[in-house]
């Protein structure tokens, strides 16, 4: 089933109100589950790789990387930056589930290229509380990929740091461009 990028038409829900996007997703899941067969897979990724990428909706990681269900762990956040929570997920991925390689993917046209820490200040003014997290905005994609690679390579919690590679995905061509960690 494909889900289009256009908003769903407004329909009447079970309670007489309008359906939401979440209602549409739950209905799609019911159709999926009706034909679902347990693939009998283990939680350990077949390719022993974890992919860290931006949450951008334009990036279909499995299609872009030729991956199938069960091949990898996919860890996504705004910007694909390596935060403490990404290190947490990678640590579990490696130590408990056997991954050995880490692929980091940022992309062109990322929303974090236009944000600054002022974003946090604006939220604080609006809600009366400063968010406890950093925005992790950046101006230079390549340098941020290098920083992310360095964060992975220097984490004391990760067992496997010899196969850590970083890329920039071009959202207009679909191509990956590898970033040299030493530049």
Image (cartoon, rainbow, N blue to C red):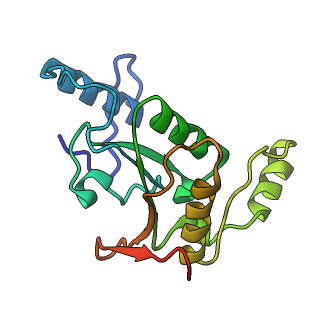
Is 73 positioned to the left or the right of 139 in the image? left
**Residue under the point 59% across and 38% down:** 88
Q: Residue 78 appears in which quarter of the rendering? A: bottom right
Residue at x-position 24% and y-position 21%: 30
Q: Residue at x 41, y 25 (%)?
A: 17
Q: How many callouts does the rendering have?
A: 0
Instruction: Tell me where residue 63 appears, x and y as whole percent.
Output: 23, 55
Say whether residue 47 is left or right of residue 141: left
**In-image side of 127 versus 53 (left or right):** right
Q: In front here: 56 or 67?
A: 67
Q: Is residue 5 visible?
A: no
Q: Residue at point 33% right, 75% down?
A: 172
Is residue 64 visible in this depiction of the protein?
yes
On the image, the x and y values in percent for residue 75 come to 46, 45
Q: Is residue 159 above or below residue 38?
A: below
Quarter occupied by residue 45: top left
Taking depth in this image into account, of 121 and 24 the one nearest to the observer is: 121
Of the pair 113 and 76, the residue shown nearer to us: 76
**Which quarter of the rendering shows the N terminus?**
top left
Q: Which sits in the foreground, 100 or 77?
A: 100
Q: Is residue 158 left or right of residue 9?
A: right
> Does residue 83 sit above or below 178 in this rendering?
above
Q: Position of residue 89 (x, y in %)?
A: 53, 38
Quadrant in the picture for residue 148: bottom right
Give the x, y percent position of residue 10: 34, 38
Locate the C terminus and report the quarter of the image it occupies. Answer: bottom right
In the picture shown, does residue 175 fall above or below 155? Answer: below
């Amino acid at each position: 089933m494909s889900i289009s990028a256009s908003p769903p038409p407004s329909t009447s829900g079970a309670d007489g109100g309008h359906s939401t996007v979440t209602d549409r997703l739950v209905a799609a899941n019911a159709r999926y589950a009706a034909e679902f067969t347990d693939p009998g897979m283990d939680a350990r990724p077949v390719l022993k790789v974890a992919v860290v990428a931006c949450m951008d909706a334009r990036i279909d990681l499995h299609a872009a990387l030729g991956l199938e269900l069960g091949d990898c762990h996919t860890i996504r956040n705004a910007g694909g930056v390596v935060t403490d929570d990404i290190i947490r997920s990678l640590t579990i991925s490696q130590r408990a589930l056997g991954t050995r390689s880490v692929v980091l993917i940022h992309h062109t046209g990322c929303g974090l290229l236009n944000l600054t820490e002022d974003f946090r200040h604006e939220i604080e003014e609006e809600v009366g509380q400063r968010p406890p997290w950093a925005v992790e905005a950046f101006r230079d994609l390549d340098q941020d990929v290098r920083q992310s690679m360095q964060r992975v390579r220097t984490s004391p919690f990760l067992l496997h740091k010899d196969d850590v590679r970083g890329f920039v995905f071009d959202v207009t061509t679909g191509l990956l461009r590898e970033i040299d960690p030493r530049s």
